Image (tube, grey):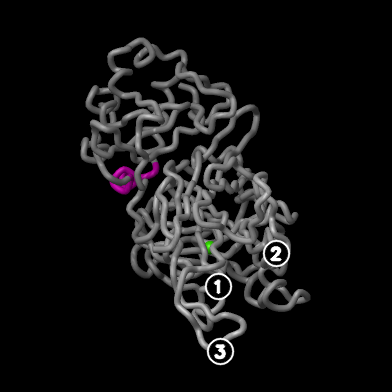
Amino acid sequence: MIKANDPSLKSWIEVPEDCDFPIQNLPFGIFKTQSSNPRVGVAIGDQVLDLSSLNKLGFLDDFKIDDSVFSNQYLNDFITLGKPLCRSLRQRISNLLNINNPELRDNKNAQYKVLNFMTNVQMQMPVKVGDYTDFYSSIDHATNVGKMFRDPANALLPNWKHMPIGYHGRASSIIVSGTPFHRPKGQTKPADSDLPVFGPCKLLDFELETAFIIGRETKFGESVSTDEASNYIFGMALFNDWSARDIQTWEYVPLGPFLAKSFASTISPWIVTLDALEPFRTAGYKQEPKVLPYLEYNGEKNIDINLEVSIQPENGSENIVCRSNYKFMYWTMEQQLAHHTSNGCNINIGDLMASGTISGPTPDSYGSMLELAWKGTKPLKLNDNTERKFINDNDTVIMRGYCEKEGVRVGFGEATGKVLKAL
Ligand code: CA
Protein backbone atom coordinates (compact mmCIF):
# COMPACT_ATOMS: atom_id res chain seq x y z
CA MET A 1 0.00 0.00 0.00
CA ILE A 2 1.44 3.35 -1.06
CA LYS A 3 0.76 6.30 1.27
CA ALA A 4 -1.95 8.68 0.02
CA ASN A 5 0.44 11.66 -0.26
CA ASP A 6 3.15 9.85 -2.25
CA PRO A 7 4.16 12.00 -5.27
CA SER A 8 4.66 8.88 -7.42
CA LEU A 9 0.99 7.84 -7.17
CA LYS A 10 -1.08 7.85 -10.34
CA SER A 11 -4.77 7.26 -10.83
CA TRP A 12 -6.55 5.33 -13.59
CA ILE A 13 -8.71 8.43 -13.83
CA GLU A 14 -6.96 10.89 -16.08
CA VAL A 15 -5.94 14.07 -14.28
CA PRO A 16 -4.76 17.05 -16.38
CA GLU A 17 -1.44 18.58 -15.30
CA ASP A 18 -2.86 21.86 -13.96
CA CYS A 19 -5.79 20.18 -12.20
CA ASP A 20 -6.29 20.88 -8.48
CA PHE A 21 -7.51 17.38 -7.74
CA PRO A 22 -4.89 14.68 -8.38
CA ILE A 23 -4.91 11.42 -6.42
CA GLN A 24 -2.66 13.06 -3.77
CA ASN A 25 -5.44 15.51 -2.81
CA LEU A 26 -8.81 13.74 -2.40
CA PRO A 27 -10.74 16.58 -0.73
CA PHE A 28 -14.23 16.03 0.65
CA GLY A 29 -17.38 17.96 -0.25
CA ILE A 30 -21.16 17.70 -0.57
CA PHE A 31 -22.72 17.45 -4.01
CA LYS A 32 -26.03 16.63 -5.61
CA THR A 33 -27.09 15.75 -9.13
CA GLN A 34 -30.43 16.20 -10.90
CA SER A 35 -31.42 12.72 -9.78
CA SER A 36 -29.74 12.41 -6.38
CA ASN A 37 -30.00 13.96 -2.93
CA PRO A 38 -26.99 15.72 -1.36
CA ARG A 39 -24.19 13.31 -0.49
CA VAL A 40 -20.51 13.15 0.37
CA GLY A 41 -18.14 13.24 -2.59
CA VAL A 42 -14.40 13.23 -3.24
CA ALA A 43 -12.89 15.25 -6.08
CA ILE A 44 -10.60 13.38 -8.49
CA GLY A 45 -9.57 15.04 -11.76
CA ASP A 46 -12.71 16.50 -13.33
CA GLN A 47 -14.94 13.96 -11.59
CA VAL A 48 -16.65 13.47 -8.24
CA LEU A 49 -16.55 10.11 -6.50
CA ASP A 50 -19.86 9.34 -4.76
CA LEU A 51 -19.06 7.85 -1.34
CA SER A 52 -22.64 6.87 -0.63
CA SER A 53 -22.83 4.71 -3.78
CA LEU A 54 -19.30 3.42 -3.17
CA ASN A 55 -20.37 2.33 0.31
CA LYS A 56 -23.58 0.71 -0.96
CA LEU A 57 -21.61 -1.28 -3.53
CA GLY A 58 -19.46 -2.70 -0.72
CA PHE A 59 -16.16 -0.98 -1.53
CA LEU A 60 -16.01 0.57 1.96
CA ASP A 61 -17.34 -2.46 3.90
CA ASP A 62 -14.26 -2.65 6.15
CA PHE A 63 -15.25 0.65 7.75
CA LYS A 64 -18.84 -0.32 8.67
CA ILE A 65 -20.07 3.26 8.22
CA ASP A 66 -23.83 3.84 8.16
CA ASP A 67 -25.12 5.24 4.86
CA SER A 68 -26.65 8.20 6.70
CA VAL A 69 -23.10 9.55 7.15
CA PHE A 70 -22.61 9.66 3.36
CA SER A 71 -26.19 10.43 2.25
CA ASN A 72 -26.02 13.67 4.11
CA GLN A 73 -26.47 17.36 3.49
CA TYR A 74 -23.28 18.19 5.39
CA LEU A 75 -19.85 16.72 6.19
CA ASN A 76 -20.32 17.17 9.95
CA ASP A 77 -21.33 13.54 10.66
CA PHE A 78 -18.47 12.32 8.49
CA ILE A 79 -15.97 14.55 10.31
CA THR A 80 -17.40 13.26 13.63
CA LEU A 81 -16.07 9.79 12.72
CA GLY A 82 -12.71 11.17 13.84
CA LYS A 83 -9.42 11.90 12.19
CA PRO A 84 -7.94 8.35 12.31
CA LEU A 85 -10.99 6.91 10.51
CA CYS A 86 -11.24 9.75 7.98
CA ARG A 87 -7.53 9.27 7.31
CA SER A 88 -7.94 5.51 6.73
CA LEU A 89 -10.90 6.19 4.46
CA ARG A 90 -8.87 8.68 2.39
CA GLN A 91 -6.16 6.00 2.14
CA ARG A 92 -8.76 3.42 0.99
CA ILE A 93 -10.04 5.84 -1.67
CA SER A 94 -6.45 6.44 -2.78
CA ASN A 95 -5.99 2.67 -3.16
CA LEU A 96 -9.25 2.31 -5.12
CA LEU A 97 -8.21 5.06 -7.54
CA ASN A 98 -4.64 3.79 -7.88
CA ILE A 99 -3.73 2.92 -11.47
CA ASN A 100 -2.42 -0.47 -10.34
CA ASN A 101 -5.60 -1.53 -8.50
CA PRO A 102 -8.15 -3.33 -10.72
CA GLU A 103 -11.01 -3.35 -8.13
CA LEU A 104 -12.81 -0.28 -9.48
CA ARG A 105 -10.58 0.32 -12.52
CA ASP A 106 -11.86 -2.79 -14.25
CA ASN A 107 -15.46 -2.58 -13.03
CA LYS A 108 -17.21 -0.31 -15.55
CA ASN A 109 -20.61 -1.03 -14.06
CA ALA A 110 -19.53 0.24 -10.62
CA GLN A 111 -17.71 3.23 -12.17
CA TYR A 112 -20.94 4.25 -13.85
CA LYS A 113 -22.63 4.34 -10.43
CA VAL A 114 -19.92 6.09 -8.39
CA LEU A 115 -18.42 8.69 -10.75
CA ASN A 116 -20.01 11.95 -11.87
CA PHE A 117 -18.46 14.62 -14.04
CA MET A 118 -18.08 17.90 -12.11
CA THR A 119 -20.00 19.66 -14.85
CA ASN A 120 -23.02 17.48 -13.97
CA VAL A 121 -23.08 18.09 -10.22
CA GLN A 122 -24.08 20.99 -8.02
CA MET A 123 -21.74 21.61 -5.11
CA GLN A 124 -23.42 22.41 -1.78
CA MET A 125 -22.30 24.02 1.49
CA PRO A 126 -19.72 21.48 2.71
CA VAL A 127 -20.35 21.84 6.43
CA LYS A 128 -23.01 23.15 8.76
CA VAL A 129 -21.03 25.92 10.39
CA GLY A 130 -21.88 26.35 14.06
CA ASP A 131 -19.65 29.26 14.98
CA TYR A 132 -17.51 31.38 12.72
CA THR A 133 -14.45 33.26 13.94
CA ASP A 134 -12.40 35.60 11.78
CA PHE A 135 -8.80 36.40 12.61
CA TYR A 136 -6.55 39.25 11.51
CA SER A 137 -3.25 37.39 11.23
CA SER A 138 -1.44 38.68 8.13
CA ILE A 139 1.23 41.16 9.17
CA ASP A 140 1.26 42.89 5.79
CA HIS A 141 -2.51 43.34 5.83
CA ALA A 142 -2.57 44.67 9.39
CA THR A 143 0.36 46.97 8.59
CA ASN A 144 -1.30 48.32 5.43
CA VAL A 145 -4.57 49.04 7.24
CA GLY A 146 -2.68 50.68 10.11
CA LYS A 147 -0.76 52.87 7.67
CA MET A 148 -3.92 53.96 5.89
CA PHE A 149 -6.14 54.67 8.87
CA ARG A 150 -3.75 55.37 11.74
CA ASP A 151 -0.07 56.17 12.01
CA PRO A 152 2.28 55.05 9.20
CA ALA A 153 5.15 55.04 11.70
CA ASN A 154 3.25 52.86 14.21
CA ALA A 155 1.02 50.88 11.91
CA LEU A 156 0.59 47.83 14.15
CA LEU A 157 -1.35 48.29 17.39
CA PRO A 158 0.58 47.36 20.57
CA ASN A 159 -1.23 44.02 21.04
CA TRP A 160 -0.82 42.74 17.47
CA LYS A 161 2.46 40.83 17.84
CA HIS A 162 1.38 39.32 21.16
CA MET A 163 -1.78 37.46 20.12
CA PRO A 164 -3.79 36.51 17.03
CA ILE A 165 -6.46 39.22 16.99
CA GLY A 166 -9.94 38.02 16.03
CA TYR A 167 -13.67 38.55 16.37
CA HIS A 168 -16.80 36.42 16.29
CA GLY A 169 -18.47 36.48 12.89
CA ARG A 170 -21.82 35.34 11.62
CA ALA A 171 -22.22 31.71 10.47
CA SER A 172 -25.71 31.95 8.95
CA SER A 173 -24.63 33.97 5.91
CA ILE A 174 -21.69 31.82 4.81
CA ILE A 175 -22.55 30.77 1.25
CA VAL A 176 -21.00 28.20 -1.05
CA SER A 177 -19.04 29.25 -4.13
CA GLY A 178 -21.29 30.14 -7.04
CA THR A 179 -24.03 31.69 -4.90
CA PRO A 180 -24.71 35.29 -6.00
CA PHE A 181 -25.82 37.89 -3.45
CA HIS A 182 -27.16 41.43 -3.47
CA ARG A 183 -25.00 44.39 -2.56
CA PRO A 184 -25.65 45.04 1.13
CA LYS A 185 -27.36 48.13 2.41
CA GLY A 186 -26.46 49.87 5.61
CA GLN A 187 -25.73 52.98 7.55
CA THR A 188 -22.85 55.18 6.47
CA LYS A 189 -21.78 58.71 7.21
CA PRO A 190 -20.81 60.78 4.17
CA ALA A 191 -17.67 62.85 4.77
CA ASP A 192 -19.50 66.11 4.03
CA SER A 193 -22.38 65.45 6.42
CA ASP A 194 -22.85 65.40 10.19
CA LEU A 195 -25.63 62.85 9.93
CA PRO A 196 -25.62 59.29 8.63
CA VAL A 197 -27.66 57.96 5.70
CA PHE A 198 -29.03 54.50 4.89
CA GLY A 199 -28.55 52.92 1.48
CA PRO A 200 -26.50 50.55 -0.71
CA CYS A 201 -22.86 50.09 0.27
CA LYS A 202 -20.61 52.17 -2.00
CA LEU A 203 -17.28 50.59 -1.09
CA LEU A 204 -17.80 46.82 -1.43
CA ASP A 205 -14.61 44.81 -1.04
CA PHE A 206 -13.39 41.22 -1.02
CA GLU A 207 -10.98 39.76 1.51
CA LEU A 208 -8.71 36.93 0.35
CA GLU A 209 -8.73 34.41 3.18
CA THR A 210 -8.55 30.73 3.94
CA ALA A 211 -10.70 28.94 6.49
CA PHE A 212 -10.10 25.88 8.60
CA ILE A 213 -12.82 23.54 9.79
CA ILE A 214 -12.81 22.18 13.33
CA GLY A 215 -12.67 18.38 13.30
CA ARG A 216 -12.84 17.56 16.98
CA GLU A 217 -14.72 19.20 19.82
CA THR A 218 -13.35 20.37 23.14
CA LYS A 219 -15.16 20.31 26.46
CA PHE A 220 -16.29 23.57 28.04
CA GLY A 221 -13.31 24.82 30.05
CA GLU A 222 -10.69 22.87 28.07
CA SER A 223 -7.76 24.45 26.23
CA VAL A 224 -5.83 23.09 23.23
CA SER A 225 -2.04 23.45 22.99
CA THR A 226 -0.24 24.45 19.79
CA ASP A 227 1.23 20.91 19.70
CA GLU A 228 -2.21 19.27 19.81
CA ALA A 229 -3.97 21.84 17.62
CA SER A 230 -3.60 20.05 14.28
CA ASN A 231 -5.56 17.08 15.71
CA TYR A 232 -8.53 19.44 16.04
CA ILE A 233 -8.38 20.70 12.44
CA PHE A 234 -10.12 18.65 9.75
CA GLY A 235 -9.11 20.67 6.72
CA MET A 236 -9.07 23.96 4.86
CA ALA A 237 -10.99 25.86 2.20
CA LEU A 238 -10.77 29.21 0.41
CA PHE A 239 -12.81 31.99 1.94
CA ASN A 240 -13.91 35.39 0.68
CA ASP A 241 -14.89 37.50 3.66
CA TRP A 242 -16.83 40.17 1.76
CA SER A 243 -16.63 43.56 3.46
CA ALA A 244 -18.56 46.83 3.19
CA ARG A 245 -15.83 49.37 3.89
CA ASP A 246 -18.04 52.46 4.17
CA ILE A 247 -20.40 50.73 6.61
CA GLN A 248 -17.39 49.39 8.52
CA THR A 249 -15.79 52.84 8.92
CA TRP A 250 -18.88 54.25 10.60
CA GLU A 251 -19.96 51.27 12.73
CA TYR A 252 -16.77 49.65 14.02
CA VAL A 253 -16.06 51.92 16.98
CA PRO A 254 -15.77 50.74 19.73
CA LEU A 255 -16.76 47.05 19.37
CA GLY A 256 -15.36 46.14 15.96
CA PRO A 257 -16.88 44.61 12.81
CA PHE A 258 -20.61 43.97 12.72
CA LEU A 259 -22.99 44.46 9.76
CA ALA A 260 -20.13 45.45 7.41
CA LYS A 261 -19.04 41.80 7.52
CA SER A 262 -22.10 39.71 8.29
CA PHE A 263 -24.04 40.02 5.00
CA ALA A 264 -22.10 37.30 3.12
CA SER A 265 -18.90 35.22 3.14
CA THR A 266 -18.13 32.82 0.28
CA ILE A 267 -16.51 29.41 0.93
CA SER A 268 -15.06 27.03 -1.68
CA PRO A 269 -16.91 23.69 -1.75
CA TRP A 270 -14.03 21.24 -1.25
CA ILE A 271 -12.43 20.77 2.16
CA VAL A 272 -8.79 19.84 1.59
CA THR A 273 -7.69 17.70 4.54
CA LEU A 274 -4.83 18.86 6.69
CA ASP A 275 -3.28 15.47 5.88
CA ALA A 276 -3.14 16.36 2.17
CA LEU A 277 -1.51 19.70 3.01
CA GLU A 278 1.23 18.28 5.27
CA PRO A 279 3.83 17.94 2.46
CA PHE A 280 3.56 21.69 1.84
CA ARG A 281 4.33 22.86 5.38
CA THR A 282 6.96 25.57 5.53
CA ALA A 283 8.67 27.72 8.14
CA GLY A 284 6.77 30.69 9.52
CA TYR A 285 7.78 34.18 10.52
CA LYS A 286 10.34 34.62 13.25
CA GLN A 287 8.07 36.04 15.91
CA GLU A 288 9.68 39.02 17.63
CA PRO A 289 9.04 39.92 20.38
CA LYS A 290 8.90 36.39 21.74
CA VAL A 291 5.33 35.19 22.20
CA LEU A 292 3.91 34.03 25.53
CA PRO A 293 4.54 30.34 26.32
CA TYR A 294 0.99 29.16 25.41
CA LEU A 295 1.55 30.51 21.87
CA GLU A 296 5.02 29.02 21.30
CA TYR A 297 5.11 26.21 18.77
CA ASN A 298 7.49 23.60 17.36
CA GLY A 299 8.25 22.73 13.76
CA GLU A 300 7.15 24.21 10.45
CA LYS A 301 3.53 25.29 10.79
CA ASN A 302 2.97 27.66 7.90
CA ILE A 303 1.79 26.22 4.58
CA ASP A 304 2.95 27.19 1.10
CA ILE A 305 -0.40 27.80 -0.65
CA ASN A 306 -0.39 30.01 -3.76
CA LEU A 307 -3.46 32.24 -3.73
CA GLU A 308 -4.92 34.48 -6.41
CA VAL A 309 -7.93 36.71 -6.94
CA SER A 310 -9.63 37.60 -10.23
CA ILE A 311 -12.30 40.13 -11.03
CA GLN A 312 -14.58 39.30 -13.93
CA PRO A 313 -16.94 42.08 -15.05
CA GLU A 314 -20.31 41.16 -16.58
CA ASN A 315 -19.68 39.86 -20.13
CA GLY A 316 -15.95 40.49 -19.67
CA SER A 317 -12.88 38.36 -19.14
CA GLU A 318 -11.01 37.64 -15.94
CA ASN A 319 -8.42 40.04 -14.53
CA ILE A 320 -6.00 38.65 -11.98
CA VAL A 321 -5.67 41.46 -9.44
CA CYS A 322 -3.79 39.69 -6.63
CA ARG A 323 -1.24 36.91 -6.20
CA SER A 324 -0.56 36.09 -2.57
CA ASN A 325 0.42 33.08 -0.45
CA TYR A 326 -0.79 31.57 2.80
CA LYS A 327 2.83 31.34 3.97
CA PHE A 328 2.75 35.11 4.58
CA MET A 329 0.60 34.56 7.69
CA TYR A 330 2.31 35.80 10.85
CA TRP A 331 0.15 33.68 13.16
CA THR A 332 -0.35 29.98 12.37
CA MET A 333 -3.64 28.07 12.57
CA GLU A 334 -2.23 26.16 15.54
CA GLN A 335 -1.58 29.42 17.39
CA GLN A 336 -5.01 30.77 16.46
CA LEU A 337 -6.67 27.67 17.87
CA ALA A 338 -4.52 27.65 21.03
CA HIS A 339 -5.39 31.29 21.59
CA HIS A 340 -9.08 30.76 20.84
CA THR A 341 -9.37 27.99 23.45
CA SER A 342 -6.96 29.53 25.97
CA ASN A 343 -9.84 30.97 28.02
CA GLY A 344 -11.74 27.65 28.07
CA CYS A 345 -14.23 28.53 25.34
CA ASN A 346 -15.30 25.23 23.76
CA ILE A 347 -15.17 24.52 20.03
CA ASN A 348 -17.43 22.20 18.03
CA ILE A 349 -17.12 20.06 14.92
CA GLY A 350 -17.97 22.22 11.90
CA ASP A 351 -16.89 25.50 13.46
CA LEU A 352 -15.07 27.65 10.94
CA MET A 353 -12.08 29.83 11.65
CA ALA A 354 -10.90 32.20 8.96
CA SER A 355 -7.36 33.49 8.57
CA GLY A 356 -8.06 37.17 8.04
CA THR A 357 -7.08 38.90 4.81
CA ILE A 358 -3.86 37.36 3.47
CA SER A 359 -1.67 40.07 2.01
CA GLY A 360 1.91 39.54 0.94
CA PRO A 361 4.75 42.06 1.12
CA THR A 362 4.43 43.44 -2.44
CA PRO A 363 1.61 45.66 -3.78
CA ASP A 364 0.44 42.97 -6.26
CA SER A 365 -0.02 40.53 -3.38
CA TYR A 366 -2.43 42.60 -1.29
CA GLY A 367 -5.56 40.62 -0.44
CA SER A 368 -8.26 43.31 -0.65
CA MET A 369 -9.27 46.16 -2.96
CA LEU A 370 -8.80 48.53 -0.03
CA GLU A 371 -5.08 47.79 -0.18
CA LEU A 372 -4.68 47.05 -3.93
CA ALA A 373 -6.20 50.42 -4.87
CA TRP A 374 -4.82 51.97 -1.67
CA LYS A 375 -8.05 53.47 -0.27
CA GLY A 376 -9.19 54.47 -3.75
CA THR A 377 -6.07 56.49 -4.61
CA LYS A 378 -4.64 53.95 -7.09
CA PRO A 379 -7.54 52.51 -9.12
CA LEU A 380 -6.88 49.21 -10.90
CA LYS A 381 -7.24 49.23 -14.66
CA LEU A 382 -9.07 46.17 -16.02
CA ASN A 383 -8.58 44.72 -19.50
CA ASP A 384 -11.91 46.17 -20.69
CA ASN A 385 -10.46 49.64 -19.88
CA THR A 386 -12.74 50.19 -16.93
CA GLU A 387 -11.31 51.02 -13.50
CA ARG A 388 -11.99 49.57 -10.08
CA LYS A 389 -11.43 51.07 -6.67
CA PHE A 390 -13.86 48.58 -5.18
CA ILE A 391 -16.27 45.94 -6.55
CA ASN A 392 -19.04 46.97 -8.97
CA ASP A 393 -22.50 45.46 -9.40
CA ASN A 394 -22.42 42.34 -11.62
CA ASP A 395 -18.70 41.80 -11.01
CA THR A 396 -17.71 38.24 -10.16
CA VAL A 397 -14.79 37.74 -7.78
CA ILE A 398 -12.96 34.44 -8.14
CA MET A 399 -10.43 33.12 -5.63
CA ARG A 400 -8.16 30.18 -6.34
CA GLY A 401 -5.46 28.42 -4.39
CA TYR A 402 -3.05 25.53 -4.77
CA CYS A 403 0.12 24.00 -3.36
CA GLU A 404 2.79 22.65 -5.69
CA LYS A 405 5.86 20.51 -5.00
CA GLU A 406 7.70 17.65 -6.69
CA GLY A 407 5.31 17.78 -9.64
CA VAL A 408 2.24 17.38 -7.43
CA ARG A 409 -0.39 20.11 -7.32
CA VAL A 410 -2.88 19.99 -4.46
CA GLY A 411 -5.52 22.66 -4.99
CA PHE A 412 -8.72 24.05 -3.57
CA GLY A 413 -10.77 24.77 -6.69
CA GLU A 414 -12.57 28.10 -6.56
CA ALA A 415 -14.47 30.42 -4.27
CA THR A 416 -16.58 32.45 -6.66
CA GLY A 417 -19.21 35.07 -5.94
CA LYS A 418 -21.17 37.50 -8.09
CA VAL A 419 -22.39 40.80 -6.70
CA LEU A 420 -25.91 41.74 -7.80
CA LYS A 421 -27.33 45.21 -7.43
CA ALA A 422 -28.83 46.17 -4.09
CA LEU A 423 -32.47 45.21 -3.58
CA1 CA B 1 -11.89 39.29 7.37
- Answer with the quarter of the image where residue 27 lies: top left
Residue 335, position in %: x, y?
55, 60
Is 187 drawn above or below residue 283 in the view shown? below
Query: Which mark is in front, 2 or 3?
Result: 3
Q: Quadrant of the N terminus?
A: top left
| Element carrying mark 3 | loop
Q: Please tell me which residue is depicted at 50% across the width and 42% down the height of the picture.
A: 414
Q: Earlier in the sequence, mark 2 or mark 1?
A: 1
How many numbered discs? Answer: 3
Q: Please tell me which residue is depicted at 66% across the width and 76% down the height of the picture.
A: 157
- Answer with the quarter of the image where residue 249 lies: bottom right
Is 327 drawn above or below residue 375 in the view shown? above
Q: Earlier in the sequence, mark 1 or mark 3?
A: 3
**Of residues 382 and 245, which is closer to you in this image?**
382
Residue ID for mark 3: 194
Q: Please tell me which residue is depicted at 53% across the width and 51% down the height of the picture.
A: 395
**Of residues 347 and 116, which is closer to you in this image?**
116
Amino acid under label 1?
Answer: Asp
Amino acid under label 3?
Answer: Asp
* Residue extent of the magenta highlight: 75-83
Residue ID for mark 2: 374
